[in-house]
Image: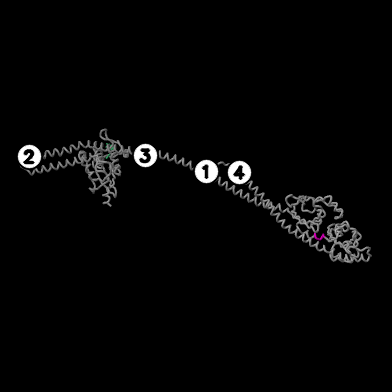
Amino acid sequence: MTSRSLSHTSWFAVIGAALLSGLILWETARYARSVALDDIRVRSAYTLDLVVENLRGELAKYSFQPRLLASSTILADALRRHPDEPTIDRANSELERINEVTGALATYLMDKEGLTVAASNWASDKPFVGRNFSFRPYFKEAMQGRLGRFSALGTTSGERGYYFAHPVRDAGKTIGAVVVKMAVARLETAWRASDDVVLVLDEEGIVFLSSKPEWRLNAIAPLTVAARKRLSETRRYAGEPHHQLSLSRAPDSNIIEIGKNDLPGTPNTAGKSHKYLAISAPMNEAGWRVLILADASGVASRVQIALLVVGFMLASAFLASLNIYQRRRRLNERLELQETAKSELEVKVLERTKDLSRAVARLRAEVSERQRAEEELRQTQEELIQASKLSALGRLSAGLSHELNQPLTAIRNYAENARIFLSRQNTATADANLGSIVEMGERMARIIRNLRTYARNEPVGSRPARLCQAIRNAIGLLQPELRKADIDMSLDFSDEELMVVGGDVRLQQVFVNLISNAIDSMTGAPRRQLRVSVELHTTEVAIAIADTGPGIKTADINRVFDPFFTTKEVGEGTGLGLSITYGIVNQFGGRISANNNDDGGATFTLTLQRAESNREAAE
Ligand code: ADP
């Protein structure tokens, strides 16, 4: 998901979830309602069974009494034509006695015209005796030879009762009927304790018995004209008006709604209508229908609780999925960011790599440039060394020619003298002269050998070199100048064979340069002493060349190794000697420094590494 707003798919999911939730809630309500109603139905069916059984039992108790009474001769006598007063009295007493035993409301005897001839309540203030009840259906049924049954309000007593009537026969002919009026009011008192409303309706739909007294004698449905006619003919409820109860019933259920104000005494105090679950059973033998109205107001709250629980679960599920969805979205966004960052990083890395390879190429070019420059420098250095050597050679040549001329002159003299002594047969002296000639020759050969070594072009690099030999060779080369300048030369070293890291030729050149400078500085000086001393250390050797010249000016002391620095006259100094010396010593891995002595003059100190063979011996 790329956009921050919901995509089409998500909208579909939301709408789908909403529809599904609606469906679930609707089903929940339906199910909760049916479960709640089932509960009520089961309970009220049980109540209904109890009520019906109870009614049947009560009715059964009285149903057979009239039949028993019909066989009584006392009663039959009272129905015979013109009974005398004692017969009627006997019948009254008998009925009163029996009524007392059975606990009926009244027990009485009617003749075939419907006139009451004797009654249990003959002595009461509202006796039935003398009253005609022929309009009552139970009388008619009895006169037709059947057991008459009827529920009605007493026209004399105003008391509800259930009537059983049985024909009284004499010689096969029906001469009257005996009637037992059973009390029903006490049945209702037992129902009052019940939460449910218990109603007993008659055939016309009028409430005959009710757990709620206020509902009595009200009609639950509009009375038809025929019904009204029947009621007035039978005087069933003694002309009492019947209030019409508006019980509306949902078409597909047994829920009965009782409107407000319709039923005084219903628990609709808030002025609302009240709902009941209705369940009924017929009691055909009594002409009744028993109706139980179970309070269904709790159904709504049970449905509400179920809806709340399921709604809460749905809301939790919705929140959980929202949470998961948001987490996934955040994760996707983060992944996208990471992807972008990664590709940006890759681009950067590529750029950097390119930069780096360019830098590497530049560095390589620079390195090869440096190498070439270094090579050129090295070559120039070598050429310089060579050039400076040649210039030194030129400088030396004057002294050297003198040095060579001297033995040559001596050789000539010795040779001439030897010839003279030989001619004089003085062979001994001639031999001595020849010996001197040989000696001179050797000396000349040594000078020339030194010169040859000096002029040789030695390859760059370090190898073991003989220190003392290099010093002696340099001194040998500079002998004519030393002598000419009248310099007192002293050497101070213990080990003739000492080896240092260097190269024979270049080391010799170093000493030629340093000793030449010392000779130059002491020319015309009052004290002319040159001292070369060697000091041994574990890995190094320090060689000091100290003169007694004027020394170096303090300002110049750091510049003497600079190329072309010279204090000498034009044509006398090049200013290259010390700089070349410095370079050579560096090549050997050594050091060189210049100092002024306390008692005048300068000392150049050279530090060289001892060659491996020496160092091992020393250790
Ligand atoms: P050059 O000898 O051709 O002048 P160098 O490089 O050999 O060149 O010497 C540079 C300078 O160092 C000299 O001109 C001199 O002034 C000074 N110098 C070198 N050696 C000595 C020394 N022993 N005493 C005093 N000054 C010296």
Element carrying mark 2:
helix
Query: What is the three-letter code of the residue carrying label 2?
Result: Ile
Tell me what residue is drawn at x 9 percent, y 43 percent.
431
Where does residue 371 sit, x and y in percent of width and height? 33, 39
Element carrying mark 1:
helix
**Nearest-to-viewer mark from 3 and 1:** 1
Query: What is the three-letter code of the residue carrying label 3?
Result: Arg
Q: Is tag 3's residue or tag 4's residue first in the polypeptide sequence?
A: 4
Quadrant of res 395: top left
Q: Which mark is residue 420?
A: 2
Residue numbers of the magenta segment: 184-188
Q: Which mark is residue 99?
A: none
- Residue 185 within the segment the image draws in magenta: yes
382 lies above or below 316: above
Image quadrant holding the N terminus, namely top right
Q: Are marks 4 and 1 in contact (CB under 8 Å)?
A: no
Q: Nearer the viewer, residue 316 or 616?
A: 316
Q: Which mark is residue 364?
A: 3
